[in-house]
Image (spheres, rainbow, N blue to C red):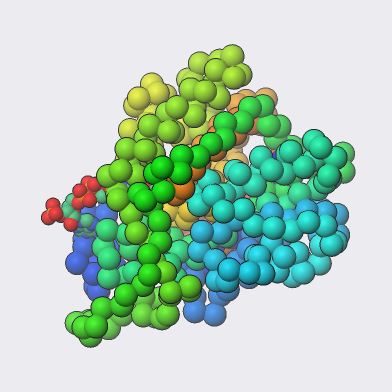
Amino acid sequence: MVGIGSAVPGQRVSNSEIETFLDTSDEWIQSRTGIRERRVAEPELTLLELAARAARAALTAAGVDPAAVDTVICSSSSPDATFPSLACRLQAELGCPHGPAFDVQAACSGALYGMVLAQSMIQSGLSRTVLVVAAEIFSRLLDWSDRSTAVLFGDGAGAFLVGGHDQKGAEIVAIDLGADGGGAWALDTVRYRPSEEAPSTPLPEYASSARALDRVVHMDGREVFRFSTKILEQIVVRLAGAAGIEPNEIALIVPHQANSRILATAAGRLGVPFERFACNVERLGNTSSASIPLALAEADRLGRCHDGELVCLVAFGGGLTWCGVLLRWQPTAVGIDDPGDLDTNLGIAGREQLPSQDHKEVSA
Ligand SMILES: CC(C)(COP(=O)(O)OP(=O)(O)OC[C@H]1O[C@@H](n2cnc3c(N)ncnc32)[C@H](O)[C@@H]1OP(=O)(O)O)[C@@H](O)C(=O)NCCC(=O)NCCS
């Protein structure tokens, strides 16, 4: 993996803002999920634009021309069209050559499914440089009157650039990939049935506009919680076993950012200190398939990825699907496009061009 990119909308929506139109509280949301705020796409921002921003962040940081990308793989659980694929539209938007372009659907595991596919295509000789982009605008897939789901998700995009011409980056050591379709019912989408009653307080634009494909998220939270904690633990144990090490020898675990209670529970079961988990769900919520590249880009910028150490990526989500990738870290170019970055100073904060040389020098 030679490059990582991430992009988020500038609009920040706090729990307190949601409290004004939904029967919930900042206290409930923070104590059950760890989420304090999330990013929500402005009305004019499209999924394609968000995906393109993350892709350009990765390409620019790695110094790779879009013309060198011979395969584009995208993931989105919140698509704005059934076809053409986001990948085909992104290929044209970036000006990549006419190699294969397709979407994978693996819900929150999509970015890692894409990374595994990229590696297979490179190893088989089908491709040389693969761009994997996960982009989500979940705010348009939520029923904002359903408090059991509306408070959990956020918008964002992340990209992995895999392969390249003689470039170095993090290396894939082991993979754990799977699905259990028998659990599909626990996390899915249903037809949107807007309430016929007029809201008692005015709704913000993101909560009152039409839903992207007239469908919304539906979830059995307890079942998903059970599955997530169990599979996270199992993946880390299996990947450690494949590498011949103990789980607590992994330097950094970058899990899907579902909620911090899931991560803390899994950390406890594994006997790995929670400090070894990368967690930014507090600021971004659950961004579905975009969450791992977003969290990994941030972790590297914070100086948490060290050369030669093992970094474990763990995804799980609707399907039910899962994917773990164990990486041996090597210097990897990172670009973060965050126009709303007021706290961490990790992103480019409105700069026109991402730096390609000094990407390691930006600190928290
Ligand atoms: C969603 C989740 C936070 C709910 O927590 P929980 O402790 O299981 O809560 P429950 O669903 O049992 O609901 C407990 C109470 O809180 C209420 N509640 C639910 N959402 C609420 C909200 N946003 N604000 C206030 N109260 C809420 C429920 O109505 C219920 O009230 P009742 O006891 O009066 O019936 C938890 O199940 C979870 O984290 N699940 C995994 C979700 C996830 O990460 N999904 C994505 C994975 S990819």
Q: Is residue 231 above or below residue 130?
A: above
Q: Is residue 256 left or right of residue 346?
A: left
Quadrant housing the N terminus: top right
Residue depicted at 81% across the width and 37% down the height: 124
| Image position of 195 with respect to 302: above or below | below
Q: Name the residue located 36 percent from the left edge and 72 percent from the top edge.
A: 192
At horizontal 74% and vertical 70% (from top left) the residue drawn is 93
Is 222 positioned to the left or the right of 62 in the image?
left
Q: Nearer the viewer, residue 43 or 304?
A: 43
Q: Foreground: 328 or 305?
A: 328
Task: Give the left or right position of residue 261, taking residue 158 as reference.
Answer: left
Give x and y (percent) for residue 357: 77, 49
Residue 308: % across, % down: 67, 25
Confirm whether residue 355 shows in the render. no
Which is nearer the eye, 310 or 108? Answer: 108
Q: Is residue 242 visible?
A: yes
Which residue shows up at 24% across the image and 69% down it?
A: 22
* Rendered image quadrant of residue 194: bottom left
Whole-percent x, y for residue 164 in the image: 82, 45
Q: Tell me if residue 61 comes above or below residue 181 in the rendering.
A: below
Residue 254 appears left or right of 88: left
Q: How many marks?
A: 0
Q: Residue 65: horizontal and vertical position, in percent? A: 83, 57
